Image: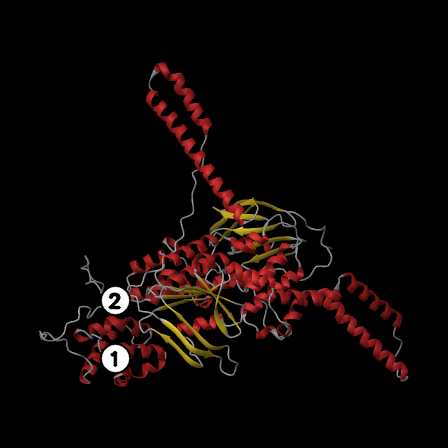
Amino acid sequence: MTEVASSVVHEVLGRRVLDVDQPIIDYIVNVLADEDFDFGLDGEGAFEAIGELLVGAGCVTDLSECRSVCSTLTEKFGKHGLVRAKPTVRSLATPFRMNEGMDEDEAPKKKPEVLEGPLLSERDKQKLERRKRKDERQREAQYQVHLAEMEAARAGMPVACVNHDNSGGPIVKDIHLENFNISVGGRDLIVDGSLTLSFGRHYGLVGRNGTGKTTFLRHMAMHAIDGIPQNCQILHVEQEVVGDNTTALQCVLNSDIERTQLLEEEARLLAQQRDLEFEEASDKSNGPIDKDAMSHRIEEIYKRLELIDAYSAESRAAAILAGLSFTTEMQRKATKHFSGGWRMRIALARALFIEPDLLLLDEPTNHLDLHAVLWLESYLVKWPKTLIVVSHAREFLNTVVTDILHLHGQKLSIYKGDYDTFERTREEQLKNQQKAFEANERSRSHMQSFIDKFRYNAKRASLVQSRIKALDRLGHVDEIVNDPDYKFEFPTPDDRPGPPIISFSDASFGYPGGPLLFKNLNFGIDLDSRVAMVGPNGIGKSTILKLIAGELQPSSGTVFRSAKVRIAVFSQHHVDGLDLSSNPLLYMMRCYPGVPEQKLRAHLGSFGVTGNLALQPMYTLSGGQKSRVAFAKITFRKPHLILLDEPSNHLDLDAVEALIQGLVLFQGGVLMVSHDEHLISGSVDELWAVSDGRVTPFNGNFQDYKKILQSS
C-alpha cells in the first residue's frame, strides 16, 4: 500500500519532489497511506493534515494550489481503491468497540468554534504566512548576532598562562568591587553591587537559574568591573581546549609559556654547542663564535628553570590529570581524540596547574565521575588562593567553600560558612524580617486608625499631630518577596503495562570493530523501579541507557521491551539539540503540531517555564532553564519509564530539590545515571554498580559506595 501511495504522490507532485528532503516525502506518503486516514470531502482532510507542510517544503507555491493538489491526491487514491468509504449503516451483529476512533495520546479534536467577524481571505492568509516567515528570519538573525557577540567576548579574554612574577604591580590580595552594574540585552542582572573578596577564601556563588551567575563570572574574567586590579590574573574555566595533535599532558604544560620558551632556547643552544665542538674537532670552523657568552646564557637558563620549578612541572601536571581520571596512556593521547567532556577536564587541569590569583569555576563537576569529584574536592580544599565556584552539588559546596555569595533580587550578599549554614542563616533571617514587617504593619495600622478616627476632633488635634509625626518616623520595612516555588510535575501515564516492561536476557554489547563492553547482562525494570547507576566515566553507563531505550541493539542475547511502554530519555544531547533561535512555546508547537497552544503552555508551566519565560529566545535562557524545556519536551507523551543521564547538570540547587520531589511523586519507573549524592539519596531506592562489563546491584547506599571509592 505504501508503494502505491508513494507512486501517486510522485505522480501528482512531479519534479518538485526532487527538491524536497526525503524524510518529508516519506512522512507525507505514510500519512496518506494510513488505512484509517480520512481524506474528507474533496480532499479537505488531506489539506488539514499535510497542507502547511506542502507549502512550507516548497511542494506547492501557495494554499490555493495546495487545495487543488490535495483534491487531486484524493481522486487518484480513490481510483487505486485506497480511500475507504465511511459506512453509514452498521450491522447490529457486528462487534462494537467502545474506544474505536479514539486516539490514545491526544484528546479528540473539538468542533471548530464559530468565529464572529469575517473569515480570512486567501490573500490575508498569505500575508500571515509571509509575516510568519519574516519573524523566523528575524529570530535567526538575532541569534546570529548573539553568537557573534559571544565570540567577540571570548576573543577579549586574557591569555591563560602561568605567571612566575608580578612585574605588573604588587601581589594581589583582597579585591574590592563597589557600586557596579551588570546587564545583558537591556535586562539588569546586578544593580549597585558591592563586594569584597578576601584573599584565600573559597566562595560558592548560588542563586536561581537565570539570575546572572555565569554572566557575573564572565564580567570578572574580562576585568569588566571597576575595582579589579589590572595585574590580577583571573581564569574562568568555561570552554573546552581545542582538539589538535597536542597531547593532553603537553596541553597543560604549554600554559607555562616561559618554561616552554626556556626549554626550547636551551635545546637550541645545546645543539649549537655540539655542532661547534664537532667543527673544532674536524677543523671546519665557520668563524669566531663567542662560546663564553653561549655558556653564560645556558647557565642563566638553568638558574631560571630551577627558580620557576620547571623540572617538577611535568610531574605536577601529570598528577592533576591523573586526579581527573586520565590514565598514563590517555595523558599521551592527542586532544583531538577526546570528546568534549574530556577536553573540558583538560581545561580544568590547565587552570589548576596555572594557579591564577582568582579562579572561577562554573559547574566543574558536570563532566566528572564520582572518583574525580572526590579528588577535586580534596584538591580545592587546599587551594591557596581565592576561588569562586558555581555548583548544583550541595555536598561539593559543603566540602569546598568557606563563604556563600547569594545572587538574589539583583543584589549580591555574602554569608559565612558552607551551604548548609547559609540555608539555616537565610531561613532565620527571612523569619526575622517577616516578623519585623508584620510588627511594623501592625504599628502603622494602629496609628493610622487613630489618626483617621480623630483627625477632625479639635480636642485631640495635638495627639493626632504627634501620631502623624510618629508614623513618619516609623519608616517602612520591606515586605519579603520570595522566589516562586519551583515545580517538576511529571505527567502520570494513563495506562500501566504489566511487568516486566524491560528485560535483559544474556545481553552482550560491543561497538563494531571494538571489544565487548558488556557480557551476559540479566536484569529487569518495571514501573516501580527507582534505580541509579554508578561507576566511572567511560565504563558504559550511557550505553546501557541507549540499549534500554532501543537506540542500540545488543550484539547477542535479547532485550525485551513491552510493546505498550513509552520511554522518555533525558541527556545533555537533548539540551544541546534545542533550537536556540526559537522560544520554548514555539519549539514545543513545532515538536507537537496540532496540539492546542494552551495545552503546551500548561505542560511547560508544569516544569516552571511560565509567563514571559516561555516566550524568550532560548539563547537567552540559562543552562538550567534549557534543561527544564528539554524535560517538558520528552515527557509530553506521558512516559511510563524515564531514563535520566546526569539530570542535575546546570540546574540550580532549588531546581534539584524540585526535581527530587517530582521524581518521588512520578507514577512510573526511573533509571538515572548521576553522581549527585543529594539527588540519588532523595529519589531512588536502589544502586546498580557498573564495572568490568557487568551491572550488579550494590548492597548499600550512596554513602557506602562513596566510602569504598575514598578508601581505594
Describe residue 641's horizontal placement relative to residue 473 as left or right.
left
In the rendered image, residue 579, in percent from the top left (x then y), is placed at: 42, 66
What element does badge 1 sit on? Answer: helix
Amino acid type at image mark 2: Arg
166 relative to 561, above or below: above
* Numbered mark located on residue 123 in the image: 2
Quarter holding the N terminus? bottom left
Residue 598 visible to an observer of this rendering: yes
Q: Position of residue 299 (x, y in %)?
A: 84, 67
Pointer 1 local density, CA inside 10 Å: few below 14, some 14–19, many at least 20: some
Residue to which mark 1 is pinned: 33
Kindly identify the residue that appears in the image at 87 percent across and 79 percent down. Answer: 277
Q: Quadrant of residue 575?
A: bottom left
Q: Is residue 66 left or right of residue 286?
A: left
In the displayed orientation, state which residue is furthest to the front. Answer: 699
Q: Please, is residue 462 above or below residue 262 in the view?
A: above
